[in-house]
Image (cartoon, rainbow, N blue to C red):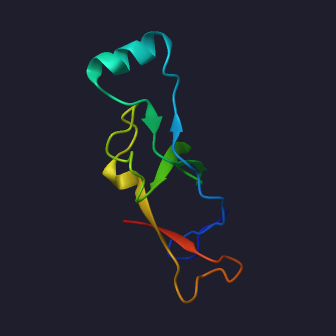
Amino acid sequence: MRTDADGRFGYRAIVPVAYPIPGDGPVGELLIRLGRHNMRPNHIHMMLEAPGYKKLVTSLYPSGDKYLFSDAVFGVKKSLIVVRMVPLSCFDSRLTACLFRT
C-alpha cells in the first residue's frame, strides 16, 4: 500500500467483526469480578514503514462498533478510530472506498 502525495491512503478489505478474548481461567475470572465483558471491538492491524522513521505497528478501529469504548484490553484510543467514507472519487480509482482518520 502506498500513500498519495498528500499522505492519504485507501484499501479494500472485509469488514472485521468484534470477537471475544478467552472468558475462562484467570482473565475471565478477573473480568467477571470487575463487571466487564470479554469482547474486543472490530479492528484492523496495520504495519507502517517510511524511510527515516521507525516501523509502526498499530490497529485501526472502524467507528460504530458497540465495544469501541469498553474494549476488554483497553486498546482503543480516540486517535485510532476511523470512519469509512465513500467519496464520489478516490485518489485511486481501483478502490471503492477510502479510509480517513477522524
- Residue 54 visible from this viewpoint: no
Q: Residue at x 64, y 77 (%)?
A: 96
Q: Residue at x 36, y 65 (%)?
A: 102
Across and down, in percent, residue 31 comes to 36, 21
Quadrant in which the N terminus appears = bottom right
| 42 and 6: which is toward the camera | 42
State the image quarter where residue 33 is shown. Answer: top left
State the image quarter where residue 12 is shown. Answer: bottom right
Q: Residue furthest left?
A: 34
In the image, residue 84 sits, relative to residue 29, either above or below, namely below
Q: Residue at x 32, y 52 (%)?
A: 78
Q: Is residue 26 toward the left or the right of residue 98 in the image?
A: left
| 84 and 47: which is toward the camera | 84
Q: Is residue 55 toward the left or the right of residue 77 in the image?
A: right
Q: Residue at x 40, y 38 (%)?
A: 75
| 29 and 74: which is toward the camera | 29
Q: How many marks?
A: 0
- Residue 44 visible from this viewpoint: yes
State the image quarter where residue 73 is shown. Answer: top left
In the image, residue 89 sits, relative to residue 92, either above or below, namely below
Across and down, in percent, residue 87 comes to 52, 84
| 34 and 2: which is toward the camera | 34
Across and down, in percent, residue 46 comes to 58, 49
Q: Residue furthest top?
A: 26
Q: Residue furthest bottom?
A: 88
Across and down, in percent, residue 89 comes to 58, 88
